[in-house]
Image (cartoon, coloured by chain):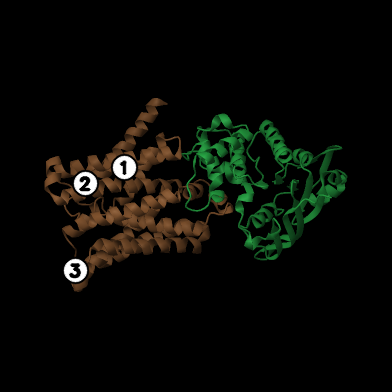
């Protein structure tokens, strides 16, 4: 595979994108999991599906969309979805979690409509649903790099505010952290990461890469920084093993990456049980 | 003559939830260096009043001044340390060390986009030593007892060197022995560091001995004044505002009969 990476551009794109996503998805995932918002990434990925399906459908109808990378519309839909979730959370103050199923079902609904209208998209759509090694373009890689820079800068400069909000939101509010603005920015960043990850992991499995490495990390980490490091390590291991096996077995990388994450989680749980 | 400056000044605060009155015409002033115990039965509006002081809730009527200025233009949140009742209800599985939790108390003092540095870590360690938790820096917060966790939360409130410490029933869920040492630590903080304290509690017997001032709240303020004045209140006066009989155990101790 090493030789093939140096030979084929599509493989370079897939490996580099995968390695970057293996860092940023679990990194952001830790903040999502500890705030008990794991389902939000699921909802946003389904909204991204609507955007992707919409873009694929429009590309059959309008020439402009034929030239447009569907990832843009997918990402745009996820960003709009993230802002709507925030809005709905304020509308349903006592039932905040209701925002997630509302947006999730809306995403699937629109996705189903566009897929039906276009009479299916064949392998294109399957690639977006479960990820694809061969479909990652150089443009996709540039999008991933750009989003990674935004995510890392966001987490680096707002780390203390995000930690404070995650650990004790009421305390954070009292001490002057602008929860509304930071939360809205966080949701947009989450939507961007989902958009960036869907080429490799697939829309249906993207949330797993944000939560499974974190689920394993919080079993072993004592500190928040430790949990962040473990999440990244587990995410990277899953991506590397997942991509190699997807390449040799010629199957969707989303599946192999997520199954590897599940195995890592089971291994960590088993190891913890033995130790205790 | 030295005049202590005003830290909290509430004037005619009334708050209604829909049509039910939670607070009615509450006026109170806390000055520099004072230790106030705000006591009252369940549902007396204590937590509502705290939320109003902390800016989490806007009163229906009345004005609030913090450190001499109106609350709406107050931007020095780092001058207030807050320990909530709910602090010990956080998820015990949260992956954070004691030091990380205490450092988070510097968030507002440090300002947006600025990272915490070694100097901030030293401040956090010093705050932990003040609450006698210096040996637990790298311990996972979830592994500590309720009393120890509350000390860590006090350290988090202290690390920003506040002038005022506000606590909402901080001893809920802590065993008796730890409660007493916790309160004596508060008294020490007030005496040695001159930090003004506003402590909400319904543990009348312990707290009123430590506080310099007492305010009795049951939707409205029934009494507020120096600790010595509070001691002069008769059992029937106490029982009247508390809503059920209260018996003084001896000259300086009172205990609600429930």
Q: Chain of mark 1?
A: A
Place of residue A75 in the rendered image (x, y in percent of width and height, measured from the top left):
31, 61
Sooner in the amino-acid sequence: mark 1 or mark 2: 2
Q: Which residue is mark 3?
A: A66
Nearer the camera: disc 1 or disc 2:
2
Place of residue A36 in the rendered image (x, y in percent of width and height, measured from the top left):
45, 48
Q: Colour of chain A?
A: brown
Secondary-structure class at tag 3: helix
**Label disc, if present, on residue A235 of the rendered structure:** 1
Q: CA distance from mark 1 to mark 2?
A: 14 Å
Determine if residue B57 is in view: yes
Residue at the spot 23% in from the left edge and 56% down from the top edge:
A140
**Where B88 sits versus A181, above or below?**
above
Query: B240 left or right of B22?
Result: right
Residue at the spot 29% in from the left edge and 50% down from the top edge:
A205
Q: Chain of mark 3?
A: A
Query: A84 left or right of B22?
Result: left
Q: Nearer the viewer, residue B149 or B29?
A: B29
Secondary-structure class at tag 1: helix
Sooner in the amino-acid sequence: mark 3 or mark 2: 2
Q: Which chain is green?
A: B
Q: Nearer the viewer, residue B64 or B253?
A: B64
């Amino acid at each position: 595979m090493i030789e093939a990476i140096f030979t084929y551009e599509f493989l370079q794109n897939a490996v580099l994108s995968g390695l970057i996503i293996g860092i940023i998805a679990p990194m952001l995932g830790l903040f999502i999991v500890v705030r008990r918002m794991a389902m939000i990434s699921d909802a946003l990925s389904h909204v991204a599906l609507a955007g992707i399906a919409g873009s694929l459908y429009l590309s059959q109808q309008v020439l402009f969309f034929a030239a447009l990378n569907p990832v843009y519309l997918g990402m745009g839909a996820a960003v709009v979805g993230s802002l709507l979730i925030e809005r709905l959370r304020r509308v349903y103050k006592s039932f905040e979690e209701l925002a997630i199923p509302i947006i999730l079902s809306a995403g699937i609904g629109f996705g189903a409509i566009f897929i039906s209208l276009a009479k299916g998209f064949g392998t294109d759509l399957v690639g977006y649903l479960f990820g694809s090694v061969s479909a990652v373009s150089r443009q996709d890689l540039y999008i991933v790099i750009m989003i990674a820079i935004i995510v890392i800068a966001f987490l680096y400069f707002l780390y203390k505010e995000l930690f404070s909000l995650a650990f004790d939101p009421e305390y954070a509010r009292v001490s002057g952290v602008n929860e509304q603005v930071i939360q809205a920015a966080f949701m947009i960043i989450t939507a961007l990461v989902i958009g960036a990850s869907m080429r490799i992991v697939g829309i249906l499995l993207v949330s797993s890469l944000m939560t499974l490495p974190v689920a394993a990390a919080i079993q072993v980490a004592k500190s928040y920084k430790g949990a962040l490091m473990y999440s990244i390590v587990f995410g990277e291991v899953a991506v590397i093993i997942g991509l190699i096996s997807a390449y040799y077995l010629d199957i969707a990388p989303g599946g192999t990456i997520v199954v590897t994450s599940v195995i890592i989680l089971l291994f960590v749980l088993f190891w913890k049980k033995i130790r205790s | 003559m030295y005049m202590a400056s005003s830290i909290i000044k509430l004037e005619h605060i009334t708050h209604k939830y829909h049509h039910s009155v939670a607070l009615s015409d509450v006026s109170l002033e806390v000055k520099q260096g004072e230790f106030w115990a705000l006591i009252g039965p369940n549902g007396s509006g204590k937590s509502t009043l705290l939320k109003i002081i902390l800016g989490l809730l806007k009163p229906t009527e009345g004005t609030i001044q913090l450190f001499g200025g109106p609350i709406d233009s107050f931007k020095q949140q780092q001058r207030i340390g807050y320990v909530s009742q709910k602090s010990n209800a956080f998820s015990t599985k949260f992956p954070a060390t004691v030091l990380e939790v205490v450092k988070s108390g510097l968030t507002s003092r440090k300002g947006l986009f600025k990272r915490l540095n070694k100097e901030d870590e030293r401040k956090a360690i010093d705050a932990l030593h003040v609450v006698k938790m210096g040996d637990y820096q790298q311990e996972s917060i979830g592994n500590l007892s309720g009393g120890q966790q509350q000390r860590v939360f006090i350290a988090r409130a202290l690390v920003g060197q506040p002038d005022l410490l506000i606590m909402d029933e901080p001893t809920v869920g802590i065993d008796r022995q730890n409660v007493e040492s916790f309160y004596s630590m508060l008294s020490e903080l007030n005496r040695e560091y001159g930090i003004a304290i506003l402590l909400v509690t319904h543990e009348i017997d312990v707290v009123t001995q430590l506080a310099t001032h007492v305010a009795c709240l049951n939707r409205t303020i029934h009494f507020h004044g120096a600790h010595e004045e509070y001691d002069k209140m008769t059992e029937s006066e106490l029982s009247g505002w508390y809503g059920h009989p209260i018996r003084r155990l001896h000259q300086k101790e009172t205990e609600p009969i429930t």
